Image (spheres, rainbow, N blue to C red):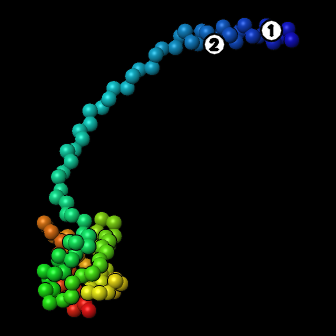
Amino acid sequence: MNKIALLLPLFASASLLAACSSEPAAEPTPAATATPAPVATPSLRAPDQALFTEMFAEACPEAKPVNTAVCRRAGMGSSEVNCDFGLGEDKYLRNKAVLVAGDAAWTLKDPAGVCAAK
């Protein structure tokens, strides 16, 4: 027990000396980094049922009107959109079309094939 009591002041004085002799850490200087300005890219409206119905009516004026349509991206980052749609009284998504992103608007990839849908 006496040995521990003798060593205790020795450890306490060593830790105090270490605290007194420590220098403050140098603050890191922030490096000047140039952040690139965001490039403004024109974005197209996400194709929905209203847009697809309008495009289908323009491409196929003699066909039955679109009753229901669902459009989804072909893949992450893809410029194509897959649309499933039903015509006339059909409530099921039996027909398929592919839309391609143009410079200012969406376009049908195969208008003749889409118009042949029944």
Task: Look at the image and tell me whether residue 7 can be seen.
Answer: yes
Vertical placement of 4 versus 49: above or below? Answer: above
Left or right: 43 as drawn, with respect to 72? left
Task: Look at the image and tell me whether residue 113 can be seen.
Answer: no
At a point 81% along the width and 12% down the height, the residue shown is 4
Disc 2: which residue: 15
Vertical placement of 57 versus 3: above or below? Answer: below
Q: Position of residue 24 (x, y in %)?
A: 46, 16
Left or right: 108 as drawn, with respect to 93? left
Disc 1: which residue: 5
At a point 30% along the width and 65% down the height, the residue shown is 77
Front in this rendered view, residue 104 or 62: 62
Q: Earlier in the sequence, mark 2 or mark 1?
A: 1
Q: CA distance from mark 2 to mark 1?
A: 16 Å
Front in this rendered view, residue 76 or 27: 76
At a point 41% along the width and 20% down the height, the residue shown is 26
Q: Position of residue 89 (x, y in %)?
A: 29, 87
Identify residue type, mark 1: Ala
Task: Please tell me in which quadrant of the rendered image residue 50 appears.
Answer: bottom left
Q: Position of residue 6 (x, y in %)?
A: 79, 7
Q: Residues within 10 Å of mark 2 (few under 14, many from 20)?
A: few
Front in this rendered view, residue 107 or 33: 107
Quarter containing the C terminus = bottom left
At mark 2, the secondary structure is helix
Left or right: 33 as drawn, with respect to 19? left
